[in-house]
Amino acid sequence: MAVGAAVLLFARLMLPTPVGVADNYDGSRLLCHLSLKSIDSSDIMRRWVTWQYVSKAGNTCRTTPYFGADLPQPPYSSSQLVLIHIAHQLTMALGLTNRNGASALDLRVLGAVGCVFIGVAIGLLFAVLRTRRLFRYLLCGAVLAVVADASFIDFAASPLSEISAVIGLLFLLPAVLLLFRGGRARWAGLALAVTAGLFLTTSKAQMIVLLAPLTLLVLAFPVAVGPLRGRIGSRVLPIGAAAVLLAGSSALTPQQDPHFTLQTKADFLFNELLYVSPDPAGDMKALGVPFYYIDQVGHAAWCPPYLVSLRDTGTYDPKTDNDKLVARDKAAEPALDNAMDFGNTTKFLLTHPDRAVRVANDAANSFFYVRPTYTGSCYTGKTATPHDQQAIPLANYDRYGSRAARPNLVDKRFTPVTSTLGLFRNTGLIPLVLLWLLPAAVAARLLARRRDRAAGERKALAWTTLFLTSVALLQFCAAAYFDGIDTSKHMNLSIFASVVAVVTAVAAARLRPEPVTVAEPGAGTVPLHTRKSEADVESAAKDLSVLVIIPTYNEAENLEKIVSRVHAANPQVHILVADDNSPDGTGKLADKLAEKDERVKVLHRAGKEGLGKAYLAGFAWGIEHDYDVICEMDADGSHRPEDFPALLAALVAEDADLVLGSRYVPGGKTVGWPKRREVLSRGGNTWVRMVTGMRLKDATGGYRLFRRATLEKIDLASVSSAGYTFQVDLAWRTNRAGLKIVEVPITFVERELGASKMSGNIVAEALWRTTVWGTKYRLGRLVGKK
């Protein structure tokens, strides 16, 4: 899975034309650590993807110019440097070149490195999941499809650190699953959670807010080892892991230089908070912003009229035909600095909650834009650029390919997330709240149920959904309230986490508990330390009162034989012949048998109403007469009485609530059936599994044993189905009730005497009813309805 995922993602990046993400200067602040410089100018670097970088002696982080200032101070670090270092070494080892000579870094190699990391994360998720293989493929395939969207995977071929945040979050998915297990698996989960958590929190400065959910995740699971046991001792290692996570994140999280800090604060104040305000002048007064800055509202921090984040040096620059500007690290006046202070703006938002909602509403539009952007130029022609046109998409193509004439061109090859979320562009906060609320509600509902409460992988996936939702919410708030620059780009992880939360919520709802087990010859489903001995099983089986219901209609030629075979194989059981007033005298024959043998009972019914009605009448009779176990068996001999002891033994040994005689588990078979009928039967069972989610190989079979308590729990009074559908209905109700179902292999023999009651109408009814049941149930589970 890991190799396949990596190869598919790299092919997605490179074919038919390589794509990446242009650098909005953030990448340059990382590449300076390796003394790397783009072979193109800074303007080209933003409008097109530049693949090759070269080594330039003396090009350090403290000497990289930005508007004449030395940036960053302190140097900006990130876990993205791990990927960049690997790609740098590979580029040098491969001897790649560019039009100016040898390349020190090729972003296409960096893309391959990113794809490998993502592939390993998805492969690990596949390996860790304890579910059916098809489910694992579907879940990992869905996650892969999300990653492959242009708004996420294109970052792999870019020096920008968004992809390292995505990688860190992907590795946390298997970590959470492992933490929900015990023993060594939890050890591995704890180590992986700390490592992936550090990789995530140190990818970008904004990720530091994720320390809260990550710390809670690590502390939530006790780890017992050696003398460290009990309620207190088992918490020592998680506390140590949390300390490592906190200390490592604090030490390694990228530190913003004062120039960008000022730029960010000014952009949030003027280009976001005051822009969405219904009373900018009044809010400026409340915040302490000098009144004459009113003209700056709606403009980026580096734009006129006040150029809040820039300083005029008074030195003429012939390239721009204007004075040379340099970045500021403090505002031009203390009053503005105090107004932009984080504590001041936070206090204002808390006392003006309507403004906080307005900011979130505007930020939601950036969320639904999805594509990474940079806040562009100050002018459109000769006029100031409107607020809603300042965000320009970062380019995904290079300048020298077939698309060279079109700067800022975006990748549209595979955009399921971008296109779907884009439908809600400019709709504000409500759709976004629903996007977070629905998966969280599904997960919370699964975890809060008293009956059928989520357990195992389902429980882990439900908690994963809540964790991802918290990541999405925290990252949205960080981008909306503390970062007024390149909002869509800085919401990338929030968008990714939100969509993956939907995937895990659907998976948790779709993944049913495991009530179904299969008893195979020589194998079992009960743990060795709880498995009953053969003597115990035999003794317990003899203590049960068992009723075998045999519905009849024109079965005179079969009845005496089947009764004789039942008692030959199982002398202690009672038989109830439920006859539908058979014209051939089956009912009278049953009465004669009952007169001779007290173990034979007869239930005469007024007329032919179908198999389902006959069994329901038999169930009611059996419950009324206090039988412990009630069995369904056909009168024609297709259900061999010789298989009955194995079914009863499985009921006892497995503590099952329902035992199905199965033709399609290992050891089961059919004899005398034409191929066409077997294909029809197997196809019907496959359809039942698909639409209902039951993991039964033979839900349509009619040879089965119920405990009386099972029949009392599944509301027989509401059963209206008949024939082929009746058997599926009872299995469906038992499964829905969370009861244990076991399948035991049997040999099904086609009848030798009499005519089959199967018809095309019965099959059509079964297909229609099961489809309706499954559809209603799946829709209900998506909204958390049981």
Image (cartoon, rainbow, N blue to C red):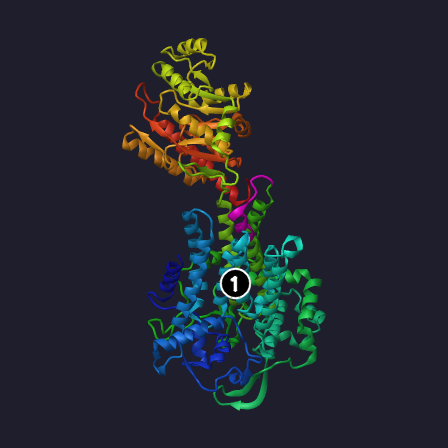
Q: Is residue 65 above or below residue 371?
A: below
Q: Position of residue 324 (x, y in %)?
A: 54, 87
Q: Looking at the rendering, in which quadrant would you find the N terminus?
A: bottom left
Mark 1 highlights which residue? Answer: 493
**How many callouts does the rendering have?**
1
Q: Is residue 280 above or below residue 178?
A: below
Residue at 34%, 73% in the rendered image: 401
Q: Position of residue 102 (x, y in %)?
A: 36, 81
Q: Element at badge 1? A: helix
- Which of 520 and 619 lies nearest the eye of the viewer? 520
- Which of 683 and 22 lies nearest the eye of the viewer? 683
Quadrant in which residue 580 is drawn? top left
Q: Looking at the rendering, in which quadrant would you find the C terminus?
A: top right
User: In the shown orientation, is residue 200 left or right of residue 357?
Assistant: left
- Identity of the amino acid at label 1? Leu
Q: Is residue 55 above or below residue 592?
A: below
Looking at the rendering, the stretch of residues picked out in magenta corresponds to 450-463
Check if residue 517 falls in the magenta segment. Answer: no
Quadrant in which residue 295 is drawn? bottom right
- Which of 28 and 689 lies nearest the eye of the viewer? 689
User: In the shown orientation, is residue 305 left or right of residue 519?
Assistant: right
Check if residue 462 falls in the magenta segment. Answer: yes
Q: Position of residue 381 (x, y in %)?
A: 48, 76
Q: What crowding class fits label 1: few (fewer than 14 Cα within 10 Å), some (14-19), or many (20 or more)?
A: many
- Which of 651 and 468 lies nearest the eye of the viewer? 651
Q: Is residue 159 above or below residue 233?
A: below
